[in-house]
Amino acid sequence: MPVCVGGCCEHGCVISDVVDLDATAVLAATEGLTRELREREVDLLRLVLQWADLHGDDPGEGRVLGSDQLVDFGGEGTPPVRELCWAELAIARECGVISIKHLAADALDLRHRLPLVWQAVQDLRLPVWVARKVAAMSRPLGKDVVGLVDVAVAAAADQAPGRVLSIAEARVIEADLEAHRARVAADAAKVGVRVSHARPGNAVDSLDGEPATRRVTLKLPTGAALGFGATVDEVASEIFDQLPEAERERLTRGELEVMAVELLSNPHAAAAFLDTARNSGAEQTPVALPKPRKLPATVYAHISDLVLDGVADGVARVEGIGPMLLEQLTELLQHREITLQPVIDLNQSHAVNGYEHPALVKHRTLLRMLGDAFPHSANIGYRRLDHDHPTPYVPPDRGGPPGQTGDHADAPLTRTHHRVKTHIPGYQVCQLGLGAYRWTTPHGLGRVVTPSGTRRVRLIRGPDDHIIGEIYPGPRIEYHPRN
């Protein structure tokens, strides 16, 4: 039972007046709350499993491309579940569909492949997050050998999470040594150069944040890695030798290495610099470093006019990078060939008579919505989005009116969300205005999606069951009225 301190609401324990608690009461309340949180996490797994059980029937014959189908989300031995059923549960959970699918896979593995671990979780001996990591790392194992992991982890359930995961990792390797050798070989083959993508929170995260830099990963064979390191070191030293004395004292070794990598990214300039530097005599004037290449790119920067005019301080939001100080944006643009584009007034709309959304409409909608228009979608960005008609398009030869396609009728969706809306009966979406969409799920959940996010709403229905309005649990969402 929940431990209630200072008051309790009908939905669970609410701790209030914590300043009146002494040390003993704080400890008691903390223990009670910790247990309750674990119970709620286990309840969530049970609800996910029940949802899977409710959607384990085959959709039937006569399916069309993109329609629902049974899919194995968990490892070997788990029952298949309908692929598109998870979108509605994700809306109820207020998270992305991919996140709820991962949760479902872990829950199914625990119940069907790791029963001893699942019992330890239900007994609150093992945190849910630890059990989920064990389920995920053991998923590639066959059902006949995964029991080795199950027994070992269940026996260690009362140990610290790090020790439990270490034991689980060792048993996963031991259970299928050949599979692990294959993983090692596959990883060794995954060489390449990768630039990190900006994640929300990176600009201010105190642990993993990178507000001014981007991480480049060079996944190379050992010999190539050593050779690259030696080359960077050699070029950095050559740059150091060519710098004025004042510059040498100011720059760190890391900054010199960055200058070397930047120079090596332009091989012709690097070759010319190194040849000139090495052929010049000791009494010659130091060789000037070549200026960085200006690379063509399309950069969308959202900046307030007050910031540009110097009236107020602020930040710019750059698509694909995140928030930047104005001076950071200036530095970024110094390395780009700039092509000015006309200002796009997002308060205006554009419509055409055809079915396909033209590039201009797609561009305006994406600049307005900043990503997917599905409730609680985690998608941020413009790539790989379908443009759906919220109100189904009716061809002119079937009585459809002109101007059906435009900003007023354009919902950008990921392919999965588009399939959910198209093939699962009961989903309804109404575009309320430019950048505002009201969704209703098959079981009656109501959401309104705007560029500001997703809000829960209670739908008001008329006598004919049509939606005539909505009630917001809080301040009403503002959005552009339909033109």
Image: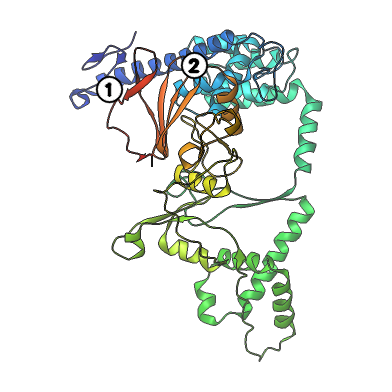
Q: Position of residue 173 (x, y in %)?
A: 73, 26
Q: Position of residue 253 (x, y in %)?
A: 57, 66
Q: Which class describes the residues within 10 Å of circle 1: few (<14), some (14-19), or many (20+)? A: some
Q: Is residue 102 visible?
A: no
Q: Is residue 204 visible?
A: yes
**On the rendered structure, is 167 left or right of 467?**
right
In the rendered structure, find residue 26 and report the number of the disc placed on it: 1
**On the rendered structure, is 7 left or right of 254?**
left
Image quadrant in which the C terminus is located: top left
Return the residue nearer the eye: 387 or 299: 387
Quadrant in the rendering for residue 75: top right
Q: Which secondary structure lies at badge 1?
A: helix
Quadrant in the rendering for residue 430: top left
* Among the two numbered marks 1 and 2 on one chain, the one whose residue lies closer to the N terminus: 1
Q: Which class describes the residues within 10 Å of circle 2: few (<14), some (14-19), or many (20+)? A: few
Q: Residue furthest bottom?
A: 283
Q: Which residue is mark 2?
A: 442
Q: The residue under label 2 is which amino acid type?
A: Pro
Residue at mark 1 to residue at mark 2: CA–CA distance: 44 Å
